[in-house]
Structures are given as structure tokens and as C-alpha cells.
Image (tube, helix red, strand yellow):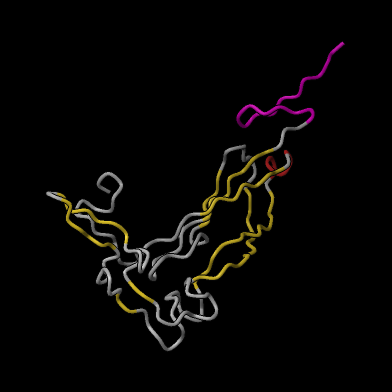
Amino acid sequence: DFFGFGDAFGRQRRGPRRGGDLRYNLELSFEEAAFGTETQLRIPRAETCSSCSGSGAAPGTKPTSCPTCRGTGQVTFQQGFFSVARTCSHCRGSGRIVAESCKTCHGEGHVPIEKTLQVKIPPGVDTGSQSRIGGEGEPGALGGPPGDLYVVLRAAEHAFFKRDGTSLFCEMPVS
């Protein structure tokens, strides 16, 4: 990224792109964090539309190259000595036009779902620990791989025990 504007020559990557990562914050009791647990997570996310295979076009049709930007996703114009590129407003930077949208996903290429995952939390985790579940993030664009799901843990405090690393302490009055 050259100053955050695509690559150094103003082109956008047009091939498959990896999907976005998701984060899930999981609250654990002190006992669950100490001894480990197995729990179910319900994750709202998008999934590639099975009707159009993520293209956004109705079954039997295919997206075509945008006539305004000729498939580049950007429109370039000259301003004095400078050449300025901006996102194509006709295709919104995708470089392709869908003539007839998929009825299932309404041309988006993905549909919202809620997925239930069984997650095993190992014993001894602490607040701030995280677990990565590969391939359970948002779907990739243009056939790219999905992102990952990061489960970030937060362990509750206990009424009597205090934690210091992997050690437990309990303050007791001794007469």
C-alpha cells in the first residue's frame, strides 16, 4: 500500500481475497477458566451464497466487465501534471456489473447465517487469552479463503481466591 491507496501504481488487487477475521468475546467463570470447559458459541456471520457461488449473479448468468472503468474498478482522469484515480461509481470498485441479481443473496454474493460451534477451553486460561479457529471467519471474496475466528477469553474474579499467574492464593485470618 502506497500511502493507503492500493499499490504504488494505483491498481487494485482483483484476484481472490481472504475473508475478514471475526472476534468473539467469551466470559468464563473462575472455575471454568481454572479447570477448562467445553461450550457452544453462536456466531452471526456471512456465508458464501450457494445459489450463485458468491458471484451475486442469478443462476445461469455471469457478471460482466464494467464498461465505465473497463474492469479496473477505478476511473483515472488527468489534472495538470497529475493523474488522479478514484473508485468507479458505476461498479463501486468491483470492476464488474451484475445484470440480473441472484434472488437468494440479492446480488451480495453472501447470506447472513448464525453458526453454532463447539469450542473446548483448556484448563488454566486467563483474561486476555485467545484461541484461533481457522476458517470460521467471513467468507473470502472472488473464491478466496475464509478468515479466522478469534475467541478472546475473560475470566471472572473469585470471591476468595486470587490468581497470580498459575498460582492461586487465598487470604485467611489466623487467630
| Residue 63 on image: x %, y % | 36, 79
Tell me which residue sits at (76%, 32%) in the image.
158
Tell me which residue sits at (39%, 66%) in the image.
144
Tell me which residue sits at (58%, 45%) in the image.
152
Magenta region? 159-175
Q: Depth check: 62 or 100 in front?
A: 100
* Quadrant showing the C terminus: top right
Left or right, 82 with reference to 114 = left
| Residue 119 on image: x %, y % | 63, 56
Q: Depth check: 110 or 170 in front?
A: 110
Tell me which residue sits at (12%, 49%) in the image.
81
Please, is residue 67 above or below residue 85 in the view?
below
Q: Is residue 160 magenta?
A: yes
Please, is residue 168 above or below residue 74 in the view?
above
The residue positioned farthest toward the top in the image shown: 175
Q: Is residue 128 magenta?
A: no
Q: For residue 10, what is the image quadrant?
A: bottom left
Left or right, 158 with reference to 99 = right
The residue positioned farthest toward the front in the image shown: 80
The residue positioned farthest toward the bottom in the image shown: 60
| Residue 36 on image: x %, y % | 67, 46
The residue positioned farthest toward the right in the image shown: 175
